[in-house]
Amino acid sequence: MVTQNGKEYHKYNTRLTDISAEFIGKLVVGFKKDFRQSYPNLETCLDNLEVLEFKREVLKVEFPGYDSVNVTWSELESLIKTTAWKTALENQKAVYLVVDTKTGKKYVGSAYGNDMLLGRWHNYIANGHGGNKLLKPLDFEYIKENFKYSILEIFKSSVDDEIIRNRESFWKEVLLTRTEFGYNDN
């Protein structure tokens, strides 16, 4: 146990070995935790792990630049936990695009205020829909399997929120996301 800011935390000493090195950065594993224990023991949970994906290439942790972001839900879930991606997204306002790769429907959203882009995308990872009316009826598993996220425009944190909302509206018009081709209703 380690005490920090008056709270106790578990601390584990780990080390990287060569065992299964070919899986590092490629294997995506899922685990449904339906119990209260904060730190489950791998030995007791191993049979409940599910291989979700095996990537051909090693997952890149470096932030590729705002104009090169185009990631799946599972990639986004992992990437926004990394220092490089957190740093790049946490102080940026943006207009972003969510694409349903199965239907081709698109959703244009914006990130401003206290949440910025990192906060908005955390919402999508938490529940799939990020609070958006037309995305709420979709099954979370469907979203995880079929949605991709990219950035249309990026803005400094000092840019007025009204400018961001106007650019969001512009992109909704350009991409026809308020029609049967999209998930925007406003």
Image (tube, rainbow, N blue to C red):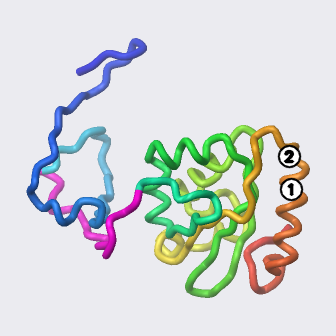
Classed neighbour count for the residue bearing mark 1: other residues with Cα under 10 Å, few (<14), some (14–19), many (≥20): some
As drawn, is 28 to the left or to the right of 79?
Answer: left
Classed neighbour count for the residue bearing mark 2: other residues with Cα under 10 Å, few (<14), some (14–19), many (≥20): some
Contact (Cβ within 8 Å) of mark 1 with mark 2: yes
Residue under circle 1?
165
Residue under circle 2?
161
Q: Residue at x 58, y 46 (%)?
A: 88
Name the element at disc 1: helix
Q: Nearer the viewer, residue 157 or 116?
A: 157
Residue 18 is situated, as x and y percent measured from the top left of the image, at: 10, 55
Q: Is residue 44 magenta?
A: yes
Amino acid type at image mark 1: Arg
Q: Nearer the viewer, residue 15 or 137?
A: 15
Amino acid type at image mark 2: Asp
Q: Residue at x 62, y 66 (%)?
A: 150
Q: Residue at x 58, y 64 (%)?
A: 69
47 to 146, vertically: above or below: above
Q: Residue at x 73, y 48 (%)?
A: 93
- Which segment is the magenta one? 43-60
How far separated are the C-alphas under marks 1 and 2?
6 Å
Q: Is residue 108 magenta?
A: no
As drawn, is 44 to the left or to the right of 126?
Answer: left
Q: Nearer the viewer, residue 21 or 147?
A: 21
Q: Quadrant of residue 68?
A: bottom right
As drawn, is 36 to the left or to the right of 180?
Answer: left
Residue 113 is situated, as x and y percent measured from the top left of the image, at: 77, 41
Name the element at disc 2: helix
23 to 86, vertically: above or below: below
Looking at the rendered image, the quarter that the C terminus falls into is: bottom right
Residue 76 is situated, as x and y percent measured from the top left of the image, at: 49, 60
Looking at the rendered image, the quarter that the N terminus falls into is: top left
Q: Quadrant of residue 78?
A: bottom left
